Image (spheres, rainbow, N blue to C red):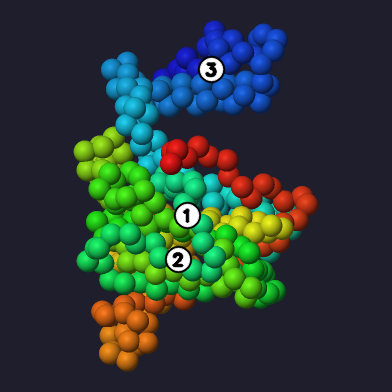
């Protein structure tokens, strides 16, 4: 089959539609638009996409936007994970020993800015829920093992139904979301409940697509973190709760080696008493290792629109 794409008329159409034949505007955006149109037209020709299919796809993208699920679709396509791997590569090529720090993994679409800030420790759960009590603690360190005091551990996770406060109206504001400043030894500690895994809204636009390609929209139980400190590169990461059936079947592909710490169960009366609790609990110990900020490295901060608190 001959290709319309290769004809002079279509080549000129793409150049004009990309702004390449006029003055003004952003030169890089023009080149990216040209590539986008070229690749889209190639795809339409190669797959014999019909006009009806084209408009179905365009309407689908519009509905994703209206549904507020663009972040879910990006995560589910593996693109957010790809951006992590690319950032690792760019950092490595700029001279950073990436593997000496805690691995990054995706932020996901459910972060809310401005969680309550406390020093050293915090309690994250604000509701009486039937979740297992979780006590998580550790240190923020530099790559030489030196504690970083005054670091901010910004933590957020789902409840036992896999739902996040703010997006789930049944939870109070900032439930299971806190910022904790590390103490003089770089330590942080929090009490919370063990989260359950997340599933995309079953009737949502993301799941409509995932089902159409034979996939599910489940994530293993996980806890998100931003870890930041002056002079250090901001870390975006998560830990997974070991044993979860979706740990190696995450719809967002966020599981990475080094991010599955042991979950230790404590159920003897002595252990329970020593913590001042009245029920069995689990502990997770996890240290975060930050890279020092250095000239010549790509920006560590990812600019991304967040839902307003
Ligand atoms: C989540 O909780 C999440 O972390 C990601 C990446 C996508 C959807 C929900
Ligand atoms: Fe999440």
Q: Is there any visible trace of residue 74 in the rendered image?
A: no
Quadrant of the rendered image containing residue 48 = top left
Measured Cα–Cα span from mark 1 to mark 3: 58 Å
Q: Which residue is mark 3?
A: 6
Is the residue 58 above or below the residue 183 in the image? above
> Which of these two is toward me, 75 or 184?
184
Q: On the picture, is 166 further left or further right than 97?
A: left
Measured Cα–Cα span from mark 2 to mark 3: 62 Å
Q: Is there any visible trace of residue 22 in the rendered image?
A: yes
| Label placed on residue 122 | 2
Q: Are marks 2 and 1 in contact (CB under 8 Å)?
A: yes
Location of the C terminus by quadrant is top left
Is the residue 27 above or below the residue 17 in the image? below
Point out residue 259 in the picture as x, y percentages from the top left corner. Answer: 47, 67
Measured Cα–Cα span from mark 2 to mark 1: 9 Å
| Label placed on residue 116 | 1
Is the residue 50 above or below the residue 257 in the image? above
Label located before the other in sequence (2 or 1): 1
Point out residue 263 in the picture as x, y percentages from the top left corner. Answer: 37, 76
């Amino acid at each position: 089959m001959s290709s319309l794409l290769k004809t002079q008329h279509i080549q000129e159409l793409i150049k004009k539609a990309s702004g390449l034949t006029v003055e003004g505007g952003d030169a890089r955006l023009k080149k990216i638009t040209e590539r986008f149109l070229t690749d889209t037209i190639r795809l339409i020709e190669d797959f014999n996409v019909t006009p009806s299919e084209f408009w179905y796809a365009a309407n689908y993208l519009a509905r994703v936007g209206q549904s507020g699920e663009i972040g879910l679709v990006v995560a589910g396509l593996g693109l957010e994970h790809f951006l992590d791997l690319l950032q690792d590569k760019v950092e490595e090529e700029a001279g950073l020993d990436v593997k000496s720090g805690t691995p990054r993994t995706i932020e996901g679409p459910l972060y809310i800015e401005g969680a309550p800030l406390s020093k050293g420790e915090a309690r994250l759960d604000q509701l009486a829920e039937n979740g297992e009590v979780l006590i998580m603690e550790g240190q923020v360190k530099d790559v030489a093992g030196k504690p970083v005091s005054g670091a901010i551990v910004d933590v957020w996770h789902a409840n036992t139904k896999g739902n996040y406060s703010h997006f789930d109206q049944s939870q109070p504001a900032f439930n299971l979301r806190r910022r904790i400043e590390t103490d003089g030894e770089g330590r942080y500690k929090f009490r919370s409940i063990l989260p359950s895994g997340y599933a995309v809204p079953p009737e949502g636009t993301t799941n409509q697509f995932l089902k159409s390609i034979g996939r599910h929209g489940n994530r293993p139980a996980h806890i998100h973190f931003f870890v930041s400190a002056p002079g250090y590169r901001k870390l975006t990461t998560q830990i997974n709760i070991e044993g979860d059936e979706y740990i190696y079947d995450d719809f967002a592909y966020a599981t990475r080696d080094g991010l599955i710490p042991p979950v230790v169960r404590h159920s003897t009366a002595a252990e329970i008493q020593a913590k001042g609790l009245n029920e069995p609990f689990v502990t997770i110990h996890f240290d975060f290792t930050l890279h020092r900020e250095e000239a010549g490295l790509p920006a560590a901060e990812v600019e991304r629109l967040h839902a307003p608190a």
